[in-house]
Protein backbone atom coordinates (compact mmCIF):
# COMPACT_ATOMS: atom_id res chain seq x y z
CA UNK A 1 0.00 0.00 0.00
CA UNK A 2 1.30 3.46 -0.87
CA UNK A 3 1.89 5.31 2.38
CA UNK A 4 2.55 8.71 0.82
CA UNK A 5 1.37 10.06 -2.50
CA UNK A 6 4.27 12.50 -2.20
CA UNK A 7 6.69 9.56 -2.56
CA UNK A 8 4.91 8.68 -5.79
CA UNK A 9 5.39 12.26 -6.99
CA UNK A 10 9.16 11.87 -6.53
CA UNK A 11 9.18 8.68 -8.63
CA UNK A 12 7.05 10.33 -11.32
CA UNK A 13 9.44 13.28 -11.56
CA UNK A 14 12.47 10.98 -11.77
CA UNK A 15 10.84 8.87 -14.48
CA UNK A 16 9.73 11.88 -16.52
CA UNK A 17 12.95 13.90 -16.18
CA UNK A 18 15.45 11.03 -16.22
CA UNK A 19 17.58 11.84 -13.20
CA UNK A 20 17.49 12.52 -9.49
CA UNK A 21 19.23 15.85 -10.07
CA UNK A 22 16.57 17.07 -12.52
CA UNK A 23 13.74 15.73 -10.36
CA UNK A 24 15.28 17.39 -7.30
CA UNK A 25 15.53 20.74 -9.07
CA UNK A 26 11.87 20.54 -10.11
CA UNK A 27 10.69 19.54 -6.63
CA UNK A 28 13.16 21.82 -4.81
CA UNK A 29 14.84 18.99 -2.91
CA UNK A 30 18.27 17.36 -2.95
CA UNK A 31 18.86 14.37 -5.24
CA UNK A 32 19.41 12.27 -2.11
CA UNK A 33 15.85 13.10 -1.05
CA UNK A 34 14.56 11.80 -4.39
CA UNK A 35 16.35 8.49 -3.83
CA UNK A 36 15.20 8.30 -0.19
CA UNK A 37 11.55 8.94 -1.10
CA UNK A 38 11.65 6.36 -3.91
CA UNK A 39 13.16 3.85 -1.47
CA UNK A 40 10.29 4.54 0.95
CA UNK A 41 7.81 3.99 -1.89
CA UNK A 42 9.52 0.70 -2.78
CA UNK A 43 9.26 -0.45 0.83
CA UNK A 44 5.57 0.43 0.86
CA UNK A 45 4.67 -1.34 -2.40
CA UNK A 46 7.05 -4.28 -1.95
CA UNK A 47 8.89 -4.13 -5.28
CA UNK A 48 11.75 -2.28 -6.93
CA UNK A 49 10.87 0.88 -8.83
CA UNK A 50 14.36 2.20 -9.55
CA UNK A 51 17.72 0.56 -10.16
CA UNK A 52 20.54 3.07 -9.80
CA UNK A 53 22.58 3.30 -12.97
CA UNK A 54 19.86 1.58 -14.99
CA UNK A 55 16.77 3.69 -14.37
CA UNK A 56 13.14 3.15 -13.57
CA UNK A 57 11.89 -0.43 -13.74
CA UNK A 58 8.82 -1.42 -15.76
CA UNK A 59 6.81 -1.59 -12.51
CA UNK A 60 8.13 1.85 -11.57
CA UNK A 61 7.06 3.23 -14.95
CA UNK A 62 3.55 1.89 -14.32
CA UNK A 63 3.43 3.63 -10.94
CA UNK A 64 4.69 6.86 -12.50
CA UNK A 65 1.93 6.63 -15.10
CA UNK A 66 -0.58 6.03 -12.32
CA UNK A 67 0.65 9.21 -10.64
CA UNK A 68 0.21 11.19 -13.85
CA UNK A 69 -3.24 9.81 -14.59
CA UNK A 70 -4.39 10.30 -11.00
CA UNK A 71 -3.18 13.89 -11.00
CA UNK A 72 -4.98 14.57 -14.27
CA UNK A 73 -8.23 13.00 -13.08
CA UNK A 74 -8.10 14.80 -9.74
CA UNK A 75 -7.43 18.18 -11.31
CA UNK A 76 -9.84 17.79 -14.21
Image (cartoon, rainbow, N blue to C red):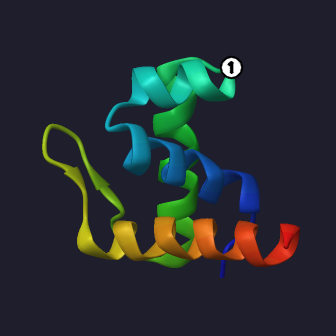
Q: Nearer the viewer, residue 62 or 34?
A: 62
Judged left or right of residue 67, residue 22 is left
**Which residue is painted at 42% across and 47% down in the image?**
16
Q: Which image quarter is the N terminus in?
A: bottom right
- Which residue is disc 1 drawn over? 28
Judged left or right of residue 46, residue 66 is right
Judged left or right of residue 26, residue 48 is left
Q: Nearer the viewer, residue 48 or 57?
A: 57
List x then y, in percent, for residue 54.
13, 46
View extreme (left): residue: 54
List x then y, in percent, for residue 8.
61, 59
View extreme (right): residue: 75
Q: Nearer the viewer, residue 31 or 43?
A: 31
Task: Establish if 25 lies above or below 69.
Answer: above
Q: Which image quarter is the C terminus in?
A: bottom right
Q: Is residue 47 visible?
A: no
Mark 1: give few (<14), some (14-19) or many (20+) Cα within 10 Å.
few
- Count of marks placed on residues: 1
Q: Is residue 61 visible?
A: yes
List x then y, in percent, for residue 2.
67, 74
**Which residue is painted at 40% across and 37% down in the image?**
17
List x then y, in percent, for residue 33.
57, 29
Q: Nearer the viewer, residue 36 or 60?
A: 60
**Which residue is painted at 60% across and 26% down in the image?**
26
**Disc 1 secondary structure class:** loop
Task: Establish if 17 lies above or below 64.
Answer: above
| Picture quadrant of residue 14 | top left
**Which residue is painted at 34% across and 31% down in the image?**
19
Judged left or right of residue 7, residue 76 is right
Amino acid sequence: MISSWDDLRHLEAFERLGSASAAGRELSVAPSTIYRRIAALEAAVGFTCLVRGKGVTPAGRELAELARSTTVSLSG
